[in-house]
Amino acid sequence: MRALQGPKTWLVHACTQSIALVLVVASAALGIQLAQSGRQLDEAHVVIGLLLFAALWILAIGGLLQHLYYRKYHQRSFIGVAHAWSARVMITLAIINGGLGLALAGGHEAGTYAAYGAVTAVIWICWVGFTVISMRRESRNMKGQ
């Protein structure tokens, strides 16, 4: 969201996240089926995945509530702040859970795990860095007004 600026940014965010939510529903359905057939419902990857799946619905509702609040008051609410920070935590947990899923699937060489860890770490560090820089700029702009 921070990379895009404009009056319709929320619409781009809503559309991309709606598509992502549909993909998550399909992934969860496949994951549940695989976990049931392999008797793996108590594995960490499955449990974390199901918790993230449930939390995503709460996140989506929070995003909608923030949008409605913003339309009325033209400012961010506590729900909006909670929405953004919850999303950041959930993305981080999803990245970690991806590694757990790779391990659960098994049959991979050690290099596969190292590659997953390296690529996701670089992406995560860049994302966090961009977020911190954007938040600092936003804070400076608010103080200057």
Image: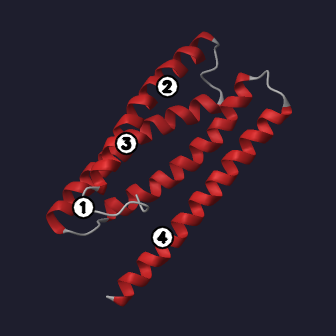
- Determine contact: label 2, label 3, CB under 8 Å: no
Q: Earlier in the sequence, mark 3 or mark 1?
A: 1
Q: Secondary structure at mark 3?
A: helix
Image position of 50 (left or right of 103): left
- Determine contact: label 3, label 1, CB under 8 Å: no
Residue 134 is tagged as: 4
Q: Earlier in the sequence, mark 1 or mark 2?
A: 1
Q: Earlier in the sequence, mark 1 or mark 4?
A: 1
Return the residue found at the far top: 37
Q: State which mark lies toward you, 2 or 4.
A: 4
Identity of the amino acid at label 3?
Answer: Thr
- Determine contact: label 2, label 4, CB under 8 Å: no
Identity of the amino acid at label 4?
Answer: Ser
Identity of the amino acid at label 1?
Answer: Pro
Q: State which mark lies toward you, 1 or 4.
A: 1
* Residue at the disc numbered 2: 27
Mark 3 and mark 4: Cα distance apart in space: 21 Å
* Residue at the disc numbered 1: 7
Question: Which residue is rendered at x = 38% and y = 82% of the image?
Answer: 141
Q: Earlier in the sequence, mark 3 or mark 4?
A: 3
Q: Secondary structure at mark 1?
A: loop
The local crowd at label 4, few if under 14, some if 14 to 19, many if 20 or more residues have their Cα within 10 Å, is some
* Residue at the disc numbered 3: 16
The local crowd at label 2, few if under 14, some if 14 to 19, many if 20 or more residues have their Cα within 10 Å, is some
Q: Earlier in the sequence, mark 2 or mark 4?
A: 2
